[in-house]
Image (cartoon, rainbow, N blue to C red):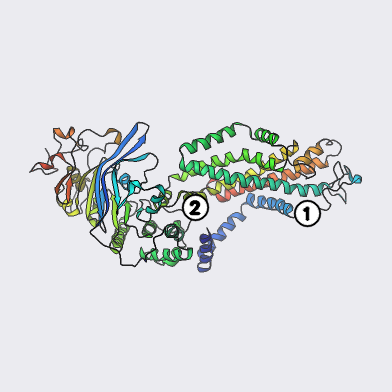
């Protein structure tokens, strides 16, 4: 509350380099009728100022839960059992509930998958943006409404001065997602978590929204954690990728490395699922089988049941995340074999 | 809310679009027969209650021996009661009592019931258990019997009526509110508000309340009929508002003893009571159709 509001066009923010978010050895479990269920384990990563990091994986791989844990929004059933989350020098785990309120929206903001329902239908969009500014900066109504119009202009909504008086139902899906982004950027957060921001939008709008996120990132130096299951989206704007499978990180590295030479069989299969325009295929590529549920994680490497490269020890030994280059980490037992190429078969 | 309203005004001047939609709403209200008839009946009673002292042809307390049990005549339009007091004047003053009780009970039960229901639905846990089991316990008793029990313990009086009726009426509101909260609890805009760092009380009152208020308003307007009826029942039993203050329930009781010979008191008091209750019920039906078009015809 005591932080003063900086103008949107203020260029004084730092860009690039320093570590903004450091997550170490995160373990998250949910209380269920069958007892504590570990859904995320051994997750460690960092976010630098002004970079876009993609978090990919199938449904149920723990992407969203990991992101929600950063804001301590796991609900009553969810619990962080182990690990540390350090946001710009602050230990998120040790903050009180009241202190968390000033982190959410102010330091870490989030945009959701469903722009159609993520806005409250009974208020104008301007009011909803203004509400956040009032909450975090204690600005007056008049100021906040003016700022809301500025923000809508910033996210590329034409005729912003009028649009702030529109209700959500008067806007299209793409427009609503822009409004959501405007709300998220209202407080110029250090970190923007985008949970599948383009899934519900059609392809042309997708590209526009991704451009917008990228543009805002470079302008404000915001770090973006982009959650998606679309490798194509990652390729177009992220600098680094974290691949998750069944609640564990399986690979992490710069986008170029991962796309050029994936070291984990799962990553390799994920990349094969991207349809290519030039390739004439009768059927789209799929990864056989489904993600195991947290109640039935297989022993050993969790991917061995679907892995084309699995060997005997994969079903008994759990691979640790190992550094294979200064920027590249992978959790595969066979990654130390000198001539191992994922996807080449046994 | 203020901003929303202001923005509407502003846009009305800027563009025709919204004026169009506003007039659509008016049109929808106007063509809703229940809403119009109910509004007129309720407004009539409310205006009578507000301006009661100006409308009474006689003092409602003045005893006139010549008018004891008199039939309706030019001086006493609806006749006189057992003490020769003007029935019309007493009916008019009685509207005040009925509405005062109804409004007080509504205010208490709505603010309490909505708060309890929203907190129970939103936070869940042990709070929800305590709140909802309390509701169940109160529901286990027949409403009126419980109200009579409480009224008996507290002793007769206007405050007694308000307290005892509030006590039996809030659980319904709380239960309704909780179920409505649960229906939109999982809406993404609530998650979005939480992720924006909005404190819980603002999420409840700014984001939940406006989205769930319509069914509660309908329930309340239909409930007014019940409350007025219950107030009349308590007064009829002598547990409610005491003489010399006139109440419709008390007047029906007084008229009952001479129903065969001089039925005017009981009949007119019953008519006033019936008119008001029917008015609120019709208004409630109309509001339901108006506020929630999906329910129309059900």
Residue matched to label 2: B206
Q: Position of residue A66 (x, y in %)?
A: 30, 45
Disc number for residue A79:
none
Position of the C terminus of chain A, as image quadrant, is top left
Residue B197, compared with residue B153, is above or below; it is below
Give the quadrant of residue A210.
bottom left
Q: Position of residue A112 (x, y in %)?
A: 36, 51
Give the secondary structure at mark 2. Answer: helix
A319 or A210: nearer the viewer: A319
The answer for how far apart the CA atoms under marks 2 and 1 are is: 40 Å
Q: Position of residue B45 (x, y in %)?
A: 72, 50
Residue A337, compared with residue A16, is above or below; it is above
Residue B182 visible? The answer is: no
Tell me the chain of label 2.
B
Cβ atoms at labels 2 and 1 below 8 Å apart: no
Residue A30 visible? The answer is: yes
Residue matched to label 1: B53
Tell me the chain of label 1.
B
Give the secondary structure at mark 1. Answer: helix
Q: Which comes sooner in the sequence, label 2 or label 1?
A: 1
Q: Residue at x 18, y 32 (%)?
A: A316
Q: Residue at x 7, y 43 (%)?
A: A338
Crowd around label 1: few <14 · some 14–19 · many ≥20 (10 Å): some
Give the quadrant of residue B223.
top right
């Amino acid at each position: 509350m005591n932080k003063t509001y900086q103008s949107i066009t203020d260029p004084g923010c730092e860009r690039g380099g320093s570590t903004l978010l450091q997550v170490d050895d995160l373990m998250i479990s949910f209380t269920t009728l069958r007892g504590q269920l570990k859904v995320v384990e051994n997750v460690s990563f960092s976010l630098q100022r002004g970079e876009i990091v993609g978090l990919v994986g199938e449904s149920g791989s723990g992407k969203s839960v990991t992101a929600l844990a950063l804001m301590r929004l796991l609900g009553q059933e969810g619990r962080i059992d182990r690990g540390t989350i350090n946001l710009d020098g602050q230990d998120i785990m040790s903050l009180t509930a009241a202190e968390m309120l000033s982190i959410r929206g102010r330091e870490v903001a989030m945009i959701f998958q469903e722009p159609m329902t993520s806005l409250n239908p009974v208020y104008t969009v301007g009011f909803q943006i203004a509400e956040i500014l009032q909450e975090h900066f204690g600005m007056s109504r008049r100021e906040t409404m003016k700022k809301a119009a500025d923000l809508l202009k910033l996210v590329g909504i034409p005729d912003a001065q009028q649009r702030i008086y529109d209700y959500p139902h008067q806007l299209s899906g793409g427009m609503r997602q822009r409004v959501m982004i405007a709300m998220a950027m209202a407080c110029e957060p250090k970190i923007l978590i985008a949970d599948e921001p383009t899934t519900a939008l059609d392809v042309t709008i997708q590209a526009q929204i991704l451009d917008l996120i990228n543009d805002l990132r470079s302008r404000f130096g915001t770090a973006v954690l982009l959650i998606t299951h679309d490798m194509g989206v990652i390729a177009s704007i992220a600098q680094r990728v974290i691949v998750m499978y069944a609640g564990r990180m399986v690979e992490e590295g710069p986008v170029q490395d991962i796309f050029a030479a994936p070291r984990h069989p799962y990553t390799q299969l994920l990349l094969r699922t991207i349809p290519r325009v030039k390739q004439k295929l009768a059927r789209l590529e799929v990864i056989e089988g489904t993600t195991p549920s947290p109640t039935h994680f297989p022993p050993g490497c969790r991917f061995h049941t679907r892995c084309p490269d699995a060997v005997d020890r994969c079903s008994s030994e759990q691979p640790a995340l190992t550094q294979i280059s200064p920027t590249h980490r992978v959790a595969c037992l066979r990654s130390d074999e000198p001539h191992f190429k994922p996807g080449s078969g046994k | 809310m203020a901003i929303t309203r202001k923005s509407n005004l502003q846009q009305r001047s800027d563009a025709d679009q919204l004026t169009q939609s506003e007039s659509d709403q008016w049109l929808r209200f106007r063509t809703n027969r229940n809403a119009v008839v109910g509004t007129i009946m309720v407004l009539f009673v409310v205006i009578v209650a507000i301006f009661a002292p100006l409308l009474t042809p006689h003092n409602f307390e003045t005893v006139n021996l010549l008018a004891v049990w008199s039939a309706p005549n030019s001086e006493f339009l609806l006749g006189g009661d057992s003490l020769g007091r003007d029935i019309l004047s007493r009916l008019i003053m009685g509207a005040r009592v009925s509405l005062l009780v109804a409004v007080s009970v509504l205010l208490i039960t709505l603010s309490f019931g909505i708060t309890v229901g929203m907190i129970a639905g939103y936070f869940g846990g042990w709070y929800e258990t305590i709140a909802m089991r309390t509701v169940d316990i109160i529901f286990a008793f027949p409403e009126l019997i419980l109200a009579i029990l409480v009224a008996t313990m507290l002793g007769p009086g206007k405050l007694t009526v308000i307290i005892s009726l509030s006590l039996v009426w809030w659980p319904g509101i709380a239960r309704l509110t909780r179920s409505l909260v649960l229906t939109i609890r999982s809406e993404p805009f609530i998650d979005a508000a939480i992720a924006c760092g909005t404190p819980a009380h603002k999420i409840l009152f700014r984001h939940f309340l406006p989205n769930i208020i319509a069914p509660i308003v309908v329930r309340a307007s239909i409930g007014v009929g019940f409350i007025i009826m219950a107030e009349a029942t308590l007064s009829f039993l002598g547990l409610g508002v005491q003489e010399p203050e006139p109440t419709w329930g008390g007047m029906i009781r007084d008229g009952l003893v001479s129903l065969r010979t001089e039925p005017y008191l009981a009949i007119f008091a019953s008519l006033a009571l019936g008119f008001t209750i029917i008015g609120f019920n019709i208004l409630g039906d109309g509001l339901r159709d108006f506020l929630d078009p999906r329910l129309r015809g059900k």
